[in-house]
């Protein structure tokens, strides 16, 4: 079953390449899309909360947030609950890019699923959700967030 995880990795890398190519004019790389989508949906998260939500390590999240901040897509502000923490918010530039981000994500999903009929799509999505939940449970139970 190594082919299964290999295929997941290929799809993930191709997804980032497609997003990067489509969003280059906006100054967004493929790996930044999940950060922007998450922050536009749930503004004011800490870097750690964002890292956990996206299943990336804290240093990767910090690098991506710094890059997005330099490009004017996000800003960090002190938390109102804990002044030691910085919360991350989307800027107007990010909110303006949001419809394009959604369009690019939807176009890619449609492209990947083209050729599957409705029941095949539903089955694939249901199976991927089950596998995703299993993977998340493993990370939460066996690995934790100190990576």
Image: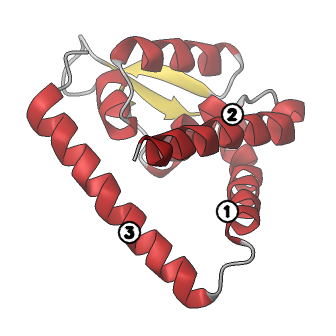
Residue highlighted by disc 2 = 30
Nearest the camera: 22 or 118? 118
Image: 109 above or below 86: below
Q: Earlier in the sequence, mark 2 or mark 3?
A: 2
Farthest left residue in view: 141
Per the image, label 2 sits on a secondary structure element best described as: helix
Q: Which mark is residue 109?
A: 1
Q: Position of residue 133 (x, y in %)?
A: 26, 55
Quarter of the figure that contains the C terminus: top left
Q: Residue at x 30, y 64 (%)?
A: 130
Per the image, label 3 sits on a secondary structure element best described as: helix
Q: Residue at x 62, y 39 (%)?
A: 10
Residue highlighted by disc 3 = 127
Label 3 CA crowd tier, 10 Å (few <14, some 14–19, many 20+)? few
Q: Is residue 92 in view from this perspective?
A: no
Q: Residue at x 41, y 47 (%)?
A: 42
Q: Is residue 50 left or right of residue 139?
A: right
Q: Position of residue 61 (x, y in %)?
A: 44, 20
Q: Are marks 2 and 1 in contact (CB under 8 Å)?
A: no
Q: CA distance from mark 1 to mark 3?
A: 16 Å
The residue mark sitting in front, 2 or 1, is 1
Q: Is residue 49 left or right of residue 121?
A: left
Q: Is residue 98 in view from this perspective?
A: yes
Q: Earlier in the sequence, mark 2 or mark 1?
A: 2
Q: Residue at x 19, y 27 (%)?
A: 81
Label 1 CA crowd tier, 10 Å (few <14, some 14–19, many 20+)? few
Splitting the image into 4 quarters, where does residue 139 fall? top left
Q: Position of residue 31 (x, y in %)?
A: 61, 30
Q: Which mark is residue 73?
A: none
Image: 93 above or below 145: below
Per the image, label 1 sits on a secondary structure element best described as: helix
Image: 7 above or below 147: below
């Amino acid at each position: 079953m190594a082919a299964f995880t290999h295929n997941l990795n290929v799809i993930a890398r191709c997804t980032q390449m497609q997003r990067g190519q489509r969003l280059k004019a906006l100054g967004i790389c493929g790996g930044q899309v999940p950060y922007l989508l998450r922050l536009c949906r749930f503004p004011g998260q800490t870097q750690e909360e964002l890292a956990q939500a996206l299943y990336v390590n804290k240093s990767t999240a910090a690098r991506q947030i710094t890059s997005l901040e330099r490009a004017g897509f996000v800003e960090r502000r002190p938390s109102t609950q804990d002044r030691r923490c910085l919360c991350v918010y989307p800027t107007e530039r990010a909110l303006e890019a949001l419809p394009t981000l959604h369009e690019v994500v939807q176009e890619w999903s449609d492209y990947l699923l083209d050729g599957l009929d409705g029941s095949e799509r539903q089955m694939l999505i249901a199976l991927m959700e089950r596998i995703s939940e299993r993977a998340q449970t493993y990370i939460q139970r066996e690995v934790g967030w100190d990576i």
